[in-house]
Amino acid sequence: MSVIQSLSRGLTVVELLAESPESLSVTEIAQKLKVDKSSATRLLQTLVHHRFAAKDLNSRRYMLGPRLSELLTDSIEPLPLKRNALPFIKELRDKTGENAHVAIYSQAQCLVIADVESRAQLRVVSGEGRLIPNHCTAIGKTLIAFGSFPLPTNLQSFTPRTITAADQLRLHMEQIRARGYAIDDEEHELGVRCLAAPVYDETGRAIASMGISGPTVRVTLSKVPELAEIVIKQAVSCSKALGFQP
């Protein structure tokens, strides 16, 4: 079989970036490909140009770019999950007054596949197609706690409240499973608090998470139990629409 070597190497680089829990240097990529650094640099520059790779200007290391998640989102949109979830997250937005969204596990992160914005003037920045960390977001932690997905290993700190110790995160997952929902208490972004609950398919497998995000001035700790109950009910209703029988 005839193979285009440069294309094959480029696809291999995308796979390396997707599978690596951390960003990679040109030297590391060159070693894995068994090519010289100049060849690896040209490959990376091409991938950056097409947004399949992204370069951290401070560390000069490379990570997966946004284009792959955009293409993945485009392919997901016709699937029953997003179609079934949309009316439930719209209702969730209306009942809570906050941004509502559904996410799935993708590329060792959390991919938002459906999102509706709050009608309030003060609201959290949202948008479909976002890839966000699992260890410090409510929708991400829900996927790990209730789904058959691995515990994150790249526990990057985003705020002083981010959990960065594996043992502490493992205990946190047990607490999430015990109460039935996850909370992001300013762990990913200061001033933002989020809640999420699992969405199940007809086999009883947690395939997605549904949640809300809002400013801490509205999503106060005293309101968390009330809001969490609404989130859980909407997630259960969405699960039933997918064939789940509690």
Image: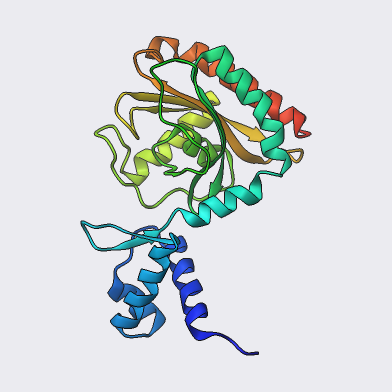
Q: How many marks?
A: 0
Q: Position of residue 223 (x, y in %)?
A: 44, 10
Q: Is residue 202 above or below residue 72?
A: above
Q: Nearer the viewer, residue 121 or 21?
A: 121
Question: Which color scheme did the rendering employ for the protein?
Answer: rainbow
Q: Position of residue 149 (x, y in %)?
A: 54, 48
Q: Nearer the viewer, residue 138 or 97?
A: 97
Locate the C terminus and report the quarter of the image it occupies.
Answer: top right
Residue at 57 percent of width and 13 percent of height: 95
Q: Position of residue 80 (x, y in %)?
A: 73, 40
Residue 202 is left or right of residue 13, and the answer is right
Residue furthest out toward the bottom: 1
Is any atom of residue 246 visible in this view? no
Residue at 58 percent of width and 86 percent of height: 3
Residue at 27 percent of width and 35 percent of height: 159
Residue 210 is left or right of residue 98, and the answer is right
Dividing the picture into quadrants, the one containing residue 135 is: top left
Residue 182 is left or right of residue 244, and the answer is left
Locate the N terminus and report the quarter of the image it occupies.
Answer: bottom right
Q: Nearer the viewer, residue 175 or 69?
A: 69
Q: Position of residue 166 (x, y in %)?
A: 36, 46
Q: Is residue 38 above or below residue 158?
A: below
Is any atom of residue 118 visible in this view? yes
Q: Is residue 70 above or below residue 30?
A: above
Residue furthest out toward the front: 49
Residue at 71 percent of width and 44 percent of height: 79
Q: Nearer the viewer, residue 64 or 107?
A: 64
